[in-house]
Image (spheres, rainbow, N blue to C red):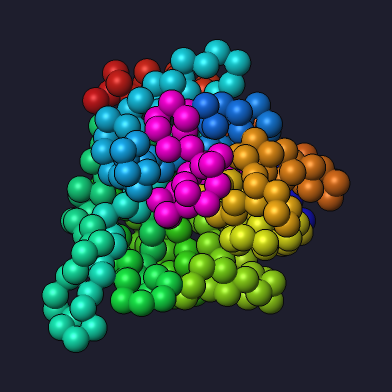
Amino acid sequence: MNRNVIVTCALTGAGDTAAKNENVPVAPEEIAADAIAAAKAGASVVHIHVRDPRTTQGSRETAYYAEVLRLIRAQDDVDPVINMTAGMGGDLFIDPENPTQAVEGTDLVPQGERLAHVRELRPEICTLDCGSLNFGEGSQLYISTPDMLRAGAEEIRSLGVKPELEIFDTGHLWFANQMFAEGLLDTPPMYQLCMGIPYGAPADVRLLSAMADMVPEEAEWTSFSIGRNQFPWVANSVLHGGHVRVGLEDNLYLSKGVKATNAGLTSRAVDVVEKLGASVASPDEAREILGLPVGGARENAARKDVTR
């Protein structure tokens, strides 16, 4: 069991969810406000996607990330660890009758382009999706090849950012371990076991146990599941020795028929953690656990600006 738990709040994601729950933040000021509210509710880390305010759909626009970051850092009374996605730009939709032809919805760019905002803004953490995946129904794939991942890991480390290794299936975990063995990841590596997402690793506690056993002893890891499994997975993760993630990216409801907010989901996660007899790590405690510079996101950002 983990006794000092990092709570991550994944604020908005890139899914088509804004019409399903009016609390899903879309504009940069809404995303930043939710990050601040989640931090006040106990989140150690805020995980940031951005959206195009006109369409509400996911975006890779660096200016949106910059505005979210500016607004969070302007808040004096919270200083959560900043974790930005770098997974946008891996979506491939194909025509089943002509699979060499990408069709509408495709957003597939080289690894370097997926890191453009990370290169510019230097968050404390960014994600690295550790393999390709049949993503849901239909003909959508997420593409992340070994060559792309090795190049991404090298660049992320060169930027002074910690990669959060997104593990959607057991083969992804195998490859993350391979990168660690090759010396591409600093100690402690940071693993995120993403479960219940079609068609990756199912939300089965037996599989969580097996995957947790595969994580290197030197690593810190989190697991989450989506939808109604979000809160059971908070408990499952803590009991297996991991950290936790909640948020509107993964779950739109606080309970049946009750639409959630990010602050509400975070508060519920904190309650579950504490009722298990564990404590929630402060942002600086999270930085210590993850091997990040301690002193807060603002001070760390200033340090990185000097070294650019």
Asked which quadrant contains residue 146, the reply is bottom left
Tell me if residue 191 comes above or below residue 118 in the rendering.
Answer: below
Tell me if residue 75 comes above or below residue 207 in the rendering.
Answer: above
Q: Nearest the camera: 249 or 124? A: 249
Q: Is residue 279 left or right of residue 227?
A: right
What's the magenta bit mostly, secondary-structure-wise? Answer: loop
Asked which quadrant contains residue 184, the reply is bottom left
Instruction: Measuring from the top left, give residue 223's x and y in whole percent.
Output: 60, 58
Q: How many marks?
A: 0
Tell me if residue 159 comes above or below residue 149 in the rendering.
Answer: above
Instruction: Measuring from the top left, give residue 168's x and y in whole percent.
Output: 47, 67
Q: Is residue 175 left or right of residue 35?
A: left
- Residue at left offset 52%, top offset 16%: 75
Instruction: Measuring from the top left, give residue 106's x and y in whole percent.
Output: 23, 62
- Residue at left offset 24%, top offset 25%: 308
- Residue at left offset 45%, top offset 58%: 166
Asked which quadrant contains residue 262, the reply is top right
The magenta stretch is 6-32
Residue 256 shown in magenta:
no
Q: Is residue 158 visible?
A: no
- Residue at left offset 38%, top offset 59%: 129
Q: Nearest the camera: 10 or 176? A: 10
Instruction: Measuring from the top left, give residue 218's x and y in whole percent.
Output: 56, 55
Q: Is residue 68 visible?
A: yes
Tell me if residue 224 comes above or below residue 186 in the rendering.
Answer: below
Spot the residue most to the bottom. Answer: 97
Q: Nearest the camera: 19 or 80? A: 19
Quarter the N terminus occupies: bottom right
